[in-house]
């Protein structure tokens, strides 16, 4: 924007009075002089325009080289600082590092800051990344982390194009993918508690009494889960690659975190989410339409698919998958959501689960949960394909 013109007035008067009379009136005449100076006020420079201390990237060597950020220790609002070093992905000696998965957000929103990268040079970073690095850094020791906005020279289109193909390898071979969802709200604690119950608790979903949502009103549960799963992170395209390829995911909302490994732990987490969505207490409450676990379900499903491609072992469809896929179809009797799809699998796959309309639909679901938990969840590497012939 062009600078505004401001007029600085300097007034000096000099008067010489000569009295005279006209028709009996005494008059006097004088003069004054005004000096003006025009000054152009330049608008304040944006930090992006300050080139004298902007970080200058050293070119990356040829080959599969990337940069890693050694994030220096600190706490609270301490200034951010770190050191960039280049490593080769072809050399396993690069050591252990984490990779950050997050939403860039608006660079010009209040809260943007700089990270000092040595030699008196700074790099400006967006508010969401500022929050993430302040929360994720250690207080006493450095942390090695890959962050796209810092480790890739975003002003160099050629480098960006060269680095993008390496991202799948980065997220596959890092120690953990740190998923940053943002800062917490008053609803965050319960939302993360519910997800942790689904990911790690040994309590049966069928019983329901131990579930965190059983202790709270529906509107409180709705706000809590949607506080976590409704964040912009889950609408990002790159989430599929970043979190799905991770050997280990650590999801952060502020200081609260939830973690799981790929493979068996991922499968267990996904199955317990599906069982929760099938629970009679869930299906008969307002939560059925108010809460959607799809963002995290899709992430877990993509993770299992990536693991299946990596190991060459296809991920089979289970009875739970079939029942879950038709859970919102209209039926006259809720028990038919299970009984109506049993014909889609062999009798041996549902051995021990016999249609019985003399018991309540809650009891029907409890028996179904017992089947899933005993044959799948308690041995996450086992699928219903593995129990053919049992009880036949």
Image (cartoon, rainbow, N blue to C red):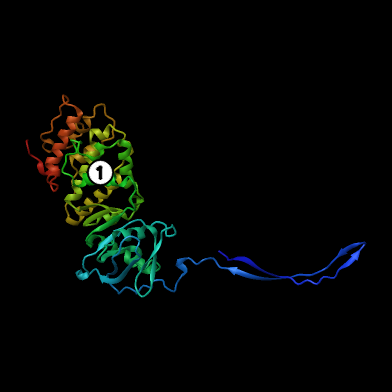
As helix, strand or loop, the secondary structure at mark 1 comes to helix
Q: Nearer the viewer, residue 37 or 125?
A: 37
Let me know if residue 229 appears in the view.
Answer: no
The C terminus - image quarter:
top left
**Nearer to the camera, 270 or 63:** 270
The image quadrant that residue 276 belongs to is top left
Position above or below: 306 against 361: below
Q: Position of residue 281 (x, y in %)?
A: 24, 33
Query: Badge 1, how many Cα within 10 Å: few under 14, some, many 20+?
Result: some
Residue at 16% of width from left, 37% of height from top?
369
- What quarter of the picture does the N terminus occupy? bottom right
Q: Where on the picture, by quarter, is residue 77?
A: bottom left
Q: Please, which residue is most extreme toward the right here?
A: 23
Camera sees residue 276: yes
Q: How many marks?
A: 1
* 186 is higher (above) or lower (below) than 219: below
Q: Position of residue 121 (x, y in %)?
A: 38, 72
Point out residue 235 in the picture as x, y percentages from the top left corner. 35, 50
Q: Is 173 on the left-hand or right-hand side of 347?
A: right
Among all residues in the image, which is located at the extreme top?
Answer: 358
Residue designated by label 1: 194
Name the residue: 39% across, 60% down: 126
In the displayed structure, does residue 203 sit left or right of residue 62? left
Q: Nearer the viewer, residue 57 or 223?
A: 223
Where's residue 359, x and y in %?
Answer: 16, 26
């Amino acid at each position: 924007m062009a600078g505004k013109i401001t007029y600085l007035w300097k007034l000096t008067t000099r008067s010489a009075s000569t009295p005279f009379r006209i028709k009996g009136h005494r008059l006097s005449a004088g003069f004054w002089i005004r000096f003006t100076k025009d000054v152009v006020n330049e608008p304040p420079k944006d930090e992006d325009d300050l080139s004298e201390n902007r970080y200058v990237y050293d070119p990356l060597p040829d080959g599969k080289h990337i940069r890693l950020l050694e994030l220096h220790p600190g706490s609270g609002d301490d200034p951010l600082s770190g050191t960039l070093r280049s490593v080769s992905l072809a050399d396993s000696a690069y050591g252990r590092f984490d990779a950050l998965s997050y939403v860039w957000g608006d660079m010009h929103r209040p809260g943007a800051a700089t990270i000092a990268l040595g030699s008196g040079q700074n790099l400006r970073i967006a508010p969401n990344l500022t929050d993430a690095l302040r929360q994720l850094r250690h207080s006493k020791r450095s942390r090695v982390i890959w962050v796209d906005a810092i480790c890739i020279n975003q002003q160099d289109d050629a480098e960006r194009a060269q680095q993008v193909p390496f991202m799948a390898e980065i997220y596959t071979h890092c120690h953990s993918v740190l998923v940053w969802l943002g800062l917490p709200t008053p609803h965050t604690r319960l939302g993360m508690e519910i997800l942790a119950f689904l990911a790690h608790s040994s309590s049966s979903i069928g019983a329901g009494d131990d579930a965190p949502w059983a202790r709270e009103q529906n509107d409180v549960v709705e706000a809590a889960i949607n506080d976590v799963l409704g964040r912009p992170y889950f609408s990002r395209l790159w989430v599929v690659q970043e979190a799905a390829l991770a050997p280990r995911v650590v999801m952060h909302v502020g200081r609260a975190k939830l973690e799981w490994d790929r493979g068996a732990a991922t499968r267990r987490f996904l199955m317990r989410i599906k069982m929760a969505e099938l629970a009679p207490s869930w299906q008969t409450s307002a939560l059925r339409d108010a809460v959607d676990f799809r963002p995290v379900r899709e992430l877990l499903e993509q993770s299992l698919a990536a693991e299946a491609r990596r190991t060459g072992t296809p991920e089979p469809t289970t009875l739970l998958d079939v029942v879950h896929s038709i859970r919102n179809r209209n039926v006259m009797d809720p028990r038919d959501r299970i009984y109506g799809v049993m014909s889609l699998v062999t009798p041996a796959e549902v051995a021990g689960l016999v249609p019985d309309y003399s018991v309540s639909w809650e009891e029907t679901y409890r028996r179904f949960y017992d089947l899933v938990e005993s044959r799948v969840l308690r041995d996450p590497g086992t699928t219903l394909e593995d129990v053919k012939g049992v009880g036949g």
